[in-house]
Amino acid sequence: MYDVHTHFIPADVLDWLKENKTIVNAKWEKRDPDKDEFLVVNGKWAFELKQTFVDSVLYLDEQAKAGIAHSLISPIPQLFGYDFEASITQEISTVYNESLAKWVNSHRRQISALGTVPLNHPVQAAMELQHAMDLGLKGAIIGPGLSENMLTDEYFTPFWEEADKQNAIIFIHPLLCDDPRLKKQMMPNLIGVPWETTVCATDLLLSGFLDRYPNVKIVLAHGGGFLPYQIGRLDKGYDCWKMIAASLEAPPAEYLKRFWYDSVLWNTDSLNYLIETVGADRVVPGSDFPFDLCSWPPVATSEKGVQSLLFK
């Protein structure tokens, strides 16, 4: 079995954080005597820095115990660094990518990886994507855009042109939603995270983006957010409003089948619906390990999705 949605932080990255903790406002906080320290970068999205995030031997042992033959590892969203100057984001991206590549090259049978890029400077992001893939990484994990830019904005053209040229896997992973209404009961994570994916993926679908960049393999986290389950509404809008149809060559439901989706849904009925809607070749097993809301071990899905994403 494969796991295409899982995260790790190499030692070189932790060392970089400690050396630059003032610049990136990194803090290690002991919040619970029964848990590991929590890491907070720039005052956002604290998470428990479990040993499985940072101990490569332990990570591989847990992978083996779960029956996972191969993991596609991603950097963690908390370290995308889009809030900082592009030079800082570039530096941490390079450190992360080179350290992941070093680990992958010594354990090719068990792991492969995606890189991270300075999305806040698209020209540098394109160059770092090329560098990461030259090192042997499969593509990159990115957030759903910047506060002032959607991923379909012309601002990101240099990055997408390089991703298309490289036939890269681009895993779009949401960040916490900052909607002021979502302040209670962990809602920024529980519904805000899939909502961010929904907004981003709907914009990609309706804009004609997938026709402009046909070689990019876009993976959507957490089963695609809420988008697959409201696709009927998009199809109805396509039928009713010419402005929706103008950018598309087919109904939205057909474009839905051009993304890939992980299986991190925690609900068998939802996962079965997703597979029926987009096809088994577009759904891949994922866990989000080792975050608290992980689906561990990942739900085994058809090998068709893994084959179409990683080997074609």
Image (cartoon, helix red, strand yellow):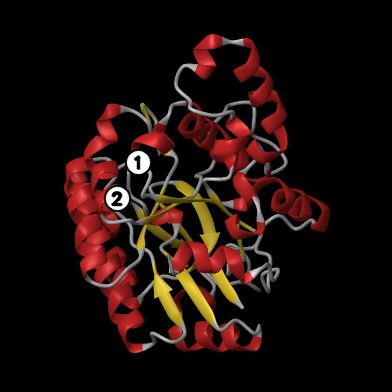
Q: Residue at the spot x=37%, y=31% of the render?
A: 152
Location of residue 213 by image quarter: top left
Q: Is residue 88 visible?
A: no
Q: Nearer the viewer, mark 2 or mark 1?
A: 1
Q: Secondary structure at mark 2?
A: helix
Q: Is residue 250 visible?
A: yes
In the rendered view, would you say 84 is above or below 113? above
Q: Residue at the spot x=28%, y=72% of the render?
A: 136
Q: Secondary structure at mark 1?
A: loop
Q: Residue at the spot x=21%, y=53% of the render?
A: 90
Q: Which mark is residue 213?
A: 1
Q: Which mark is residue 163?
A: 2
Tag 1: residue type? Tyr
Quarter of the image containing the N terminus? Answer: bottom right
Tag 2: residue type? Ala
Q: Which mark is residue 148?
A: none
**Label 2 with label 1: CB-CB less than 8 Å:** yes
Residue 296 position within the rendered picture, expressed as x and y whole percent measured from the top left: 68, 71
The Cα–Cα distance between marks 2 and 1, rounded to whole angstroms, is 8 Å
Instruction: Judge by depth and name the residue closer to the eye, 94 or 26.
Output: 94
